[in-house]
Image: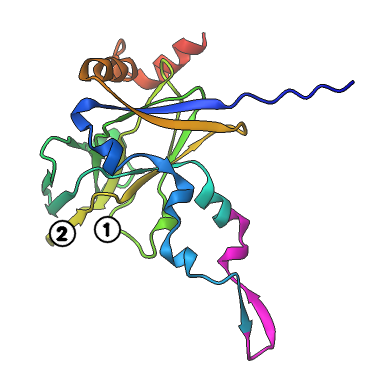
Amino acid sequence: MLFFFKEKPIEIVAFTSEEYLTINVQSPIKPAREYFPDWWKNTPSSKFNWDTFNVNSTTKSCPGIGQTLQKGFILPLWSDLAIKTQGNQYQWQYADRISKFEIHSNDQAPGFYEDYYIFKINSPWQIKSPVSLIYTFPFYLFPAPLPYLTPTGIVTPVNKMCATNIFILLKRIQEEICFMIKQGTPLFHIIPLTEKKVVFRTEVISKAEYFKLKRDTAYKKNFTANGLKNIVDKKT
């Protein structure tokens, strides 16, 4: 007699604080398949070529693009963010007036994009995950280049938790640059590094509970290589 055991899915939960209660309704992290871009929806699966009398394929036949658009989850911006730069000067403001924004020194990455600002958007989400996560720019959701770049990273959970802060790189030039990232704009494409089925949900918790989760991912006990040290310690 053969026995078939159904594999148990893994659970991934994104937590936010009651301070950001509305974002779980207005700007929640959602499955990537709910963000199919208009250009993709409007692209036919094939197109008849009247010059050659053949059928030409389109991007709809590319499994790499199609599967990417359906895999994982999208973290959108939860509040309008206005940014202005000129030379070494910069200004920023969120519409919600409470979200945080930082700049990182180029000395932290010598030789890497040295003529760019390195900005960090402090995310109100903390993710509980049993597996590592890929954070990457949702390239296919935009029909044209943006004024900033978003680097990719692989995040290994610390105490089962992953922070979700977003870095954006912006060219440092003498001319004034003014632009706004609108609420709802996709910031991260989050892809779990697993072949198992994933059950995902979001949850709003108290400020005290959220602070504890955030503290677990940011706790410092070394002056150097803090993140890597925490990961190594958990494996030994």
Gap between marks 2 and 1 measured at Cα: 9 Å
Colouring chosen for the image of the structure:
rainbow
Q: How crowded is the residue under tag 2: few (<14 C-alpha within 10 Å), some, or many (20+)? A: some
Q: Is residue 164 left or right of residue 81?
A: right
- Say if residue 173 shows up in the picture: no
Q: Amino acid at mark 1?
A: Pro
Q: Amino acid at mark 2?
A: Ile
Boundaries of the magenta span: 49-64
Magenta includes 94?
no
Q: How crowded is the residue under tag 1: few (<14 C-alpha within 10 Å), some, or many (20+)? A: some
Seen at 23% across and 42% down, the residue is 119
Q: Considering the numbered disc 1 on the image, is that residue within a helix, a strand or a loop?
A: loop
- Say if residue 120 shows up in the picture: yes
Residue 36 placed where, x, y %?
A: 45, 56
Q: Earlier in the sequence, mark 2 or mark 1?
A: 1
Seen at 24% across and 49% down, the residue is 183
Q: Is residue 139 above or below residue 72?
A: below
- Asked if the residues shown at circle 2 and circle 1 are in contact, with their CB atoms under 8 angstroms apart, the answer is yes
Q: Is residue 194 left or right of residue 102?
A: right
**Residue named by callout 1:** 147
Where does the N terminus fall, quadrant-wise? top right
Q: Considering the numbered disc 2 on the image, is that residue within a helix, a strand or a loop?
A: strand
For the image, the number of numbered tags is 2
**Residue named by callout 2:** 177
Residue 73 placed where, x, y %?
A: 44, 41
Q: Quadrant of residue 124?
A: top left
Seen at 15% across and 59% down, the residue is 177
Residue 92 placed where, x, y %?
A: 12, 46
